[in-house]
Image (spheres, rainbow, N blue to C red):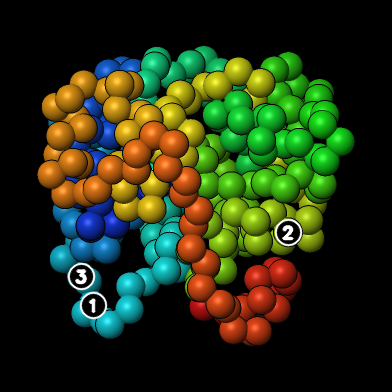
Amino acid sequence: MMNDISMLFCTCDSYSETWNPFFKLLKKYWPDYNYPVYFNSESATYSFEDLIIKCPFAKSRQKTRQKTPWSKRLLNILKYVDTEFVFMILDDYWLTDYVDSNQFNNCLDIMRANKKVGYICLTGYKTTMLNDGTGRVISSEYDGILEATSKCPYRVHAQAGLWRTQYLKKLLKGYEDAWRFEPMATIRSKFFSYRCFDVVNPIIKYPFGGIIWGGRVKEEYFNMYPSELITPLLDKREILKIGEKYTPIFGNRPIWQKIYSRFPSIKIK
């Protein structure tokens, strides 16, 4: 087992019905997976077969009126992560095909060799994520890997990817949810010298955006999984029907958040 890489599994207690399907599919489609997992939920203890799953917040939830924001929980768990790199993935990114572990290791070796590589997206969403406004994408010195320039609207994002742990910490602002993190962290990424990339061919395959959108199960993805994995979700959640539009709802933000989001040097916990 390599000791410089771990998985950062982003979840919350209310999404517990996604956990067993996620790890069942992980074991199926990535049979040689052997990195420790940092389980980022508020209070749950979880285990699955022979995986090393660390739950630093187990049974320690403080009762508050407001939920801890997504980015704040990430910052909290990153205090416990002792690996130089993290493979970050969300709980509803259920795998649909075998992971190219050779290419995963190749990307990891690139980050080990080049200290200026901060992030490599592993999903191959180059059309939507890397388009720099001119309809083109930028190649790099690495075979099968494209560079995310400062013009990309989503230079960094929450799709499955490899992160240099310190770089991820630098980009997080504790008050942001996952949807705010993506565009605002992209802006903040321009203040750092780290380079960001995406692979040409997907290394990790799952339906774009995950199976749950806005708390609802996306009907378009039902046929990608066996019914025994889908049914527990439908017992708890409504369906986002095929053709139904979905737009994340952003509340108005105080002016201090707008200012702090754009400048990485302003510290806020």
Which of marks 1 and 2 precedes in the sequence? Answer: 1
Amino acid at pointer 3: Ser
Q: Are marks 2 and 1 in contact (CB under 8 Å)?
A: no
Viewer can see residue 178: no
- Residue occupying image coordinates x 65% and y 71%: 261
Q: Which residue is mark 1?
A: 62
View extreme (front): residue: 243
Q: Nearer the viewer, residue 179 or 103?
A: 179
| Residue at 35%, 29% in the rendered image | 221
Q: Which of label 3 and label 1 is nearer to you?
A: 1
Neighbours of disc 1 within 10 Å: few (<14), some (14-19), many (20+): few
Q: Is residue 228 left or right of residue 100?
A: left
Vertical order, 78 against 89 (above or below) = below
Q: Position of residue 240 (x, y in %)?
A: 34, 43
What secondary structure is marked by label 2?
helix
The residues bearing labels 3 and 1 have C-alpha atoms spaced at a distance of 6 Å
Res. 255 image quadrant: bottom right
Residue hosting label 3 = 60
For disc 2, the marked residue is 187
Q: What kind of residue is marked 1?
A: Gln
Rounded to the nearest angstrom, the CA distance separating label 2 from label 1 is: 33 Å
Question: Which mark's residue is nearer the viewer, 2 or 1?
Answer: 2
Number of residues whose C-alpha sits closer than 10 Å to that of mark 3, classed few (under 14), some (14–19) or many (20 or more): few
Amino acid type, mark 2: Ile
State the image coordinates of residue 209 (x, y, percent, origin top left). Answer: 46, 40
Foreground pick, 179 / 236: 236
Secondary structure of residue under mark 3? loop
Q: Position of residue 202 (x, y in %)?
A: 55, 21
Can residue 225 be seen here? The reply is: yes
Q: Quadrant of residue 65?
A: bottom left
The answer to whether residue 77 is left or right of residue 227 is right
